[in-house]
Each structure stands twice: as structure tokens, then as C-alpha cells.
Amino acid sequence: MELPIFPLNGAVLFPGTSLPLNIFETRYIEMIDYALARDRKIGMIQTDEKNELFNVGCVGKINSFNETNDGRYLISLHGIKCFKIINEIEQDYSFRLINASLVELYEKEGEISKDQKESLLKLYGKYIKNKNINLSLEEIDNIETDQIIKFIAMVSPFKNIDKQALLETESLLDFYSKLKSIIELELIGDFQNKTIN
């Protein structure tokens, strides 16, 4: 499939989640116009330390759109499926366009148990306290576990490379394990920094 892409580090979209975006650069306003005139889909993707595109991103469908008085676009994207880049398309638009293939991620075997969910939320409670993140665990406790882990991955200030590793995870159980490891390593790092200082 042909896909206009929006390279934006840190703002990772996962299948089944929603991401609000404030679009103000001319090239990305043109990209949204292009998507709205077609199938309303754009590809969210990150770049590495050399500013090159990662190979995997997520297709987002524009499910709400508003234009402000000063010409900005306020949109909400709903994550559909992950994609892999086949190649970039030579064209005359100000934004980038790729050929992409859809890939099935997170939909393979395994369910996260109630005990695993409780263990994750207990750990995440320590993390948000350490990072002074204004988030109530009670608010997310009733969400389905597969949505909780994606929500945590999206809203937490993890490194871009860690968010990318989660995006490329093949099963929910792998996603869960990697997410716990990332949180644990961040907590260890915070503890060591406080000890040194």
C-alpha cells in the first residue's frame, strides 16, 4: 500500500490506540490534505540516531479532524496495524511517501493473566511516583490488559529506542515482558542517580 508518513520521535502509535496530534508545519498540513482526499490513513514512524527511518511503524486512520483559526489541524489518529517499509517513493510532494506492507504484531499466542496485570500496575505505580507523573492507576485499572500495556508504552517518557522495541514486539506476552524490563531498568537508573547525587 502507498502511505504518506509522519516521522515523529517519541509519539508512537500502537494498533488499537488513539493519538491526538497538532499539525502546523506546511508539509504535514499537505500530508493530512492528501490523506483526507484518499483513505484517511497516514503512517506514524520514528527515526534512529542517524535520522534514518526505522523499518516498522503503525498505520493510523484519521478519525477526527478540526481546523483552527490560525490554520493548524487538530486530528486524532486511530492505530490500525503495523507496517514495514518496502521502499520510499520518488514524488513531488513536500512530505514523504512509501510503499508499505502490513504486518501482524501483538496478535499471536498468549494472554496476560490477572496476576501479571497486578504485578505490572504495582511496578508502574512506583515508576509514576518516581517520575512525578500525574496519573491515577485506578483510572486505567478497568481497561483491558492489552490496552493498558499499550497505554503505558504511549504515555510514559521512555527512550525512543525502547518505544520502538515495544512497537516491533510480536506477541502480547513479549510486549508485557519487555515493558516490565524497561520500567525496571528505569527505576534502577533513577535509584542509582539519586544515590550518586
Image (spheres, rainbow, N blue to C red):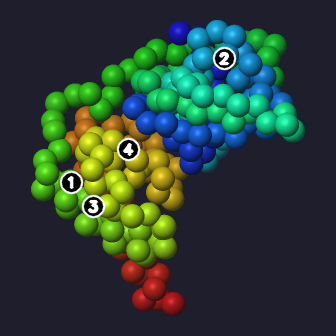
Q: Nearer the viewer, residue 178 or 71?
A: 71
Residue at image coords 33%, 42%: 147
Judging from the image, what secondary structure is the residue with disc 3 in? helix
- Sequence-wise, the earlier of marks 4 and 1 is 1
- Which dot marks residue 121? 3
Q: Is residue 167 left or right of residue 111?
A: right
The single residue placed furthest to the right in the displayed view is 70
Amino acid type, label 4: Lys
Amino acid type, label 2: Ala
Task: Report x, y in % for residue 97.
Answer: 67, 18
Above/below status of 64 relative to 135: above
User: Few, some or many C-alpha atoms within 10 Å of disc 3 (few <14, some 14-19, many ≥20)?
Assistant: many
Q: Is residue 156 left or right of residue 37?
A: left
Residue matched to label 4? 150
The answer to the question of whether label 1 and label 3 lie on touching residues, with beta carbons closer than 8 A, is yes
Residue at image coords 25%, 66%: 122
The answer for how far apart the CA atoms under marks 3 and 4 are is 13 Å
Amino acid type, label 3: Leu
Residue matched to label 1? 117
